[in-house]
């Protein structure tokens, strides 16, 4: 009879951020975490099902799925609804429901075909195929994720609903209006290209660095700012240096003359977006990219890779489901051909796709009228993803 929420943790990722925001707008009685890891506020207060943390081995946490499921089944009564986000939590939810009888509503937040490869793929892909179809309702956060689940993981399409991520546009606008930290204003007097999000394989930032190397030759004074943290930061810093780019990475005031700035994790990244000339999004795969919608809400023009899920639904919602082969002027931004994902060394010549991106990025940065049009259209589009609308759709689906 009660609604309960479940997620791996409440660390800094997009799925965690979305559930934390929704938790305040849904009538949930409990919020369970598989791990004892919470770095953002949520309501009700999170209840961990284990002492595991981000430092715990992924293999151990996967092996602990039956343990999590037993503990969830003991906490969720027959007739309750448990809404879960993220793969391990989703599998735990389904297993616990078979034991205890609650209704399992699971939500997939990324495109599993892209996310799970190597050893992780060997572990998670069979689990997704086996357990997702057993859920009472499966929710995808984009049409691209829905297609991936149906086509590659044997999830019945008729059981899948689509609810896009929500975005608190008013709060983002207020935060975006705040001043930049000391020293950054001088950087932003230059033509700044910005990106934000985790520094992970999905985001393809090594392509962005190689693209930007060419752009700075065409746009005098251009700078690239990466706002975010992640496991690839060290690799990306070294790559930027080996590409001949002057790199700033660390705390304190930035120098005015670097080429690439690693701004790290920021409690408020939005001034870094709002004051940039262009937001560049080179993702290789997505579910539904929060960072892209947040950029629109900040009023910054965007150019985004037309990867398999997310960007086209945001920037060209009425277009057919095709993939851009050339730069495409979409209603709410610029869609670009997807990048290869290959990590070639700095001595390698630019790939053809990187050259196309660099040429178009330089052209875009110098086209003030087009930048203005995109910024204005993007602000209007961001309103379609207002958090209250998403919460309303969730309440309708869950019957609460």
Image: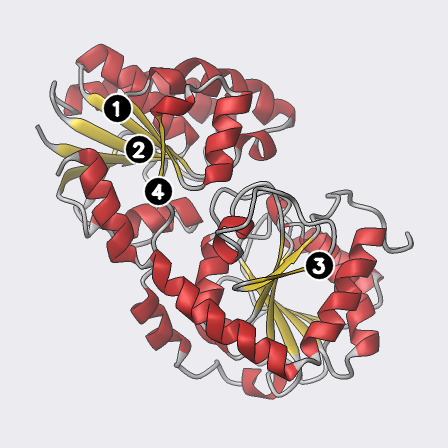
Vertical position of residue 157 compared to residue 295: above or below:
above
Q: Nearer the viewer, mark 3 or mark 2?
A: 3
In this view, the residue in front, 32 or 149, is: 149
Mark drawn on residue 163: 4
* Callout 1 crowding tier (Cα within 10 Å): few <14, some 14–19, many ≥20: many
Looking at the image, tell me whether mark 1 or mark 3 is earlier in sequence order: 1
In this view, the residue in front, 158 or 79, is: 158
Which residue, given by chain and number where applicable, does mark 1 sit on? Answer: 104
Q: Quadrant of the C terminus?
A: top left
Residue 368 location (% of width, % of height): 63, 83
Residue 262 location (% of width, % of height): 62, 66
* Callout 2 crowding tier (Cα within 10 Å): few <14, some 14–19, many ≥20: many
Vertical position of residue 117 compared to residue 184: above or below:
above
| Quadrant housing residue 7 | top left
Q: CA distance from mark 1 to mark 4?
A: 16 Å
Q: CA distance from mark 3 to mark 4?
A: 28 Å
Residue at disc 2, secondary structure: strand
Q: Nearer the viewer, mark 3 or mark 4?
A: 3
Q: In the shown orientation, is residue 337 left or right of residue 35?
A: right
Pointer 1 with pointer 2, Cβ within 8 A:
yes
Residue 235 location (% of width, % of height): 71, 52
Vertical position of residue 41 compared to residue 92: above or below:
below
In this view, the residue in front, 234 or 354, is: 354
Looking at the image, tell me whether mark 1 or mark 4 is earlier in sequence order: 1
């Amino acid at each position: 009879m009660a609604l309960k929420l479940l997620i791996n943790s409440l660390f800094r990722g997009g799925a965690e951020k979305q559930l934390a925001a929704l938790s305040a707008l849904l009538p949930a009685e409990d919020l369970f975490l598989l791990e004892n890891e919470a770095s953002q506020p949520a309501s009700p207060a999170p209840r961990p099902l284990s002492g595991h943390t981000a430092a715990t081995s992924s293999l151990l946490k996967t092996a602990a799925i039956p343990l999590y499921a037993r503990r969830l089944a003991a906490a969720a009564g027959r007739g309750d609804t448990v809404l879960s986000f993220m793969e391990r939590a989703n599998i735990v939810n389904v297993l616990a429901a078979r034991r205890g009888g609650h209704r399992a509503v699971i939500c997939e937040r990324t495109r599993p075909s892209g996310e799970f490869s190597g050893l992780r793929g060997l572990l998670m892909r069979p689990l997704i195929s086996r357990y997702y179809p057993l859920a009472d309702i499966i929710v995808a956060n984009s049409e691209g994720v829905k297609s991936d689940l149906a086509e590659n993981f044997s999830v019945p399409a008729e059981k899948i609903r689509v609810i896009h991520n929500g975005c608190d546009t008013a709060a983002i606008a207020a935060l975006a209006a705040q001043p930049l930290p000391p020293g950054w204003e001088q950087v932003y007097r230059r033509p700044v290209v910005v990106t934000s999000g985790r520094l992970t394989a999905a985001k393809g930032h090594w392509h962005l660095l190689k693209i930007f190397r060419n752009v700075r030759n065409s746009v005098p004074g251009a700078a690239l700012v990466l706002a975010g943290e992640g496991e690839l930061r060290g690799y990306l810093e070294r790559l930027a240096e080996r590409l001949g780019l002057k790199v700033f990475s660390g705390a304190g005031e930035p120098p005015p003359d670097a080429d690439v700035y690693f701004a790290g994790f920021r409690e408020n990244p939005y001034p870094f977006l709002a004051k940039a000339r262009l937001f560049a999004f080179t993702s290789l795969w997505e579910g539904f990219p929060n960072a892209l919608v947040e950029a629109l809400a900040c009023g910054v023009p965007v150019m985004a890779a037309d990867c398999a899920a997310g960007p086209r639904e945001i920037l060209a919602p009425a277009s057919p489901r095709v993939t851009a082969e050339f730069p495409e002027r979409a209603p709410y931004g610029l869609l670009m051909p997807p990048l290869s994902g290959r990590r070639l060394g700095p001595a390698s010549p630019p790939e053809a796709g990187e050259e196309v991106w660099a040429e178009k990025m330089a052209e875009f940065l110098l086209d003030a009228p087009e930048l203005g049009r995109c910024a204005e259209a993007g602000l209007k589009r961001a309103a379609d993803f207002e958090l209250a609308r998403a919460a309303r759709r969730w309440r309708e689906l869950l019957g609460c």
